[in-house]
Amino acid sequence: MRKVLVITFGVLLLVTPFAEDAFAQRGGDGGLPAADIQLTCRESEKSLKAIFGESTAVTYDGCITQEQAAREQLVKDWASYAAADRQRCAIPKQYMPSYVEWLTCFEMARDVRRIRLDQLNPKK
């Protein structure tokens, strides 16, 4: 389902105007930036229904549930993420904010590092 949401938000970038009010500022403590997931999920559902009709399986409630789960995971693992990944992945003012997208970015960065490390140190 995460892949569907990543694709969903990619579509939103094309069809939803940039919404400055959707973004919260980074906290002064350097923690996880806040995202207005209610707005993100409302806009997501609205845009997908406009594109695919009422038969779309993506709903506001499903989006909120996934965003909350992704946020919980991000909060849990925040200290373990590299500073460079935090700056690259969790940018609340650059696009429609989504904890699911941010989590996917962190996972992809981790996986790329593992692949590169495996290539440098092949197992015999």
Image (cartoon, rainbow, N blue to C red):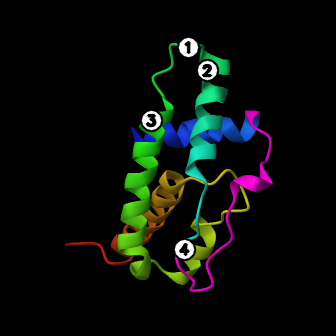
User: Circle 2 is placed at which residue position?
Assistant: 49
The amino acid on which the numbered mark 3 sits, given as a three-letter code, is Asp
Cα–Cα span, label 1 and label 2: 5 Å
Give the alpha-carbon distance from disc 1 to disc 4, as whole Å: 37 Å
* Magenta region, residue range: 15-31
Q: Earlier along the polypeptide chain: callout 1 or callout 4?
A: 1
Neighbour tally class for label 4: few under 14, some 14-19, many 20 plus, Cα within 10 Å: some
Location of residue 122 by image quarter:
bottom left
Magenta stretch, main secondary structure class: loop
Mark 3 burial class by Cα count in 10 Å: few <14, some 14-19, many 20+: few
Q: Secondary structure at mark 2?
A: helix
Residue 120 in percent (x, y) is at: 38, 77
Whether residues under marks 1 and 2 lie with C-beta atoms below 8 angstroms apart, the answer is yes
Given the image, on which type of amino acid does mark 1 rest? Answer: Glu
Q: Quadrant of the N terminus?
A: top left
| Image vertical order of residue 43 relative to residue 52, above or below | below
- Whether residues under marks 2 and 4 lie with C-beta atoms below 8 angstroms apart, the answer is no
Q: What separation in Å lies between label 1 and label 3 (alpha carbons)?
A: 15 Å
**Real-space Cα distance between discs 2 and 4?**
33 Å
Crowding at mark 1 (Cα within 10 Å: few <14, some 14-19, many 20+) = few
Can residue 119 be seen at all in this image of the molecule?
Answer: no
- List the residue tagged with mark 4: 85
For disc 1, the marked residue is 54
Q: Give the percent coordinates (x, y) of residue 41.
A: 57, 40
Judged by depth in the image, the label closer to the viewer, 2 or 4, is 2
Sequence-wise, the earlier of marks 4 and 3 is: 3
Mark 4 element type: helix
Is 105 situated above or below 26?
above
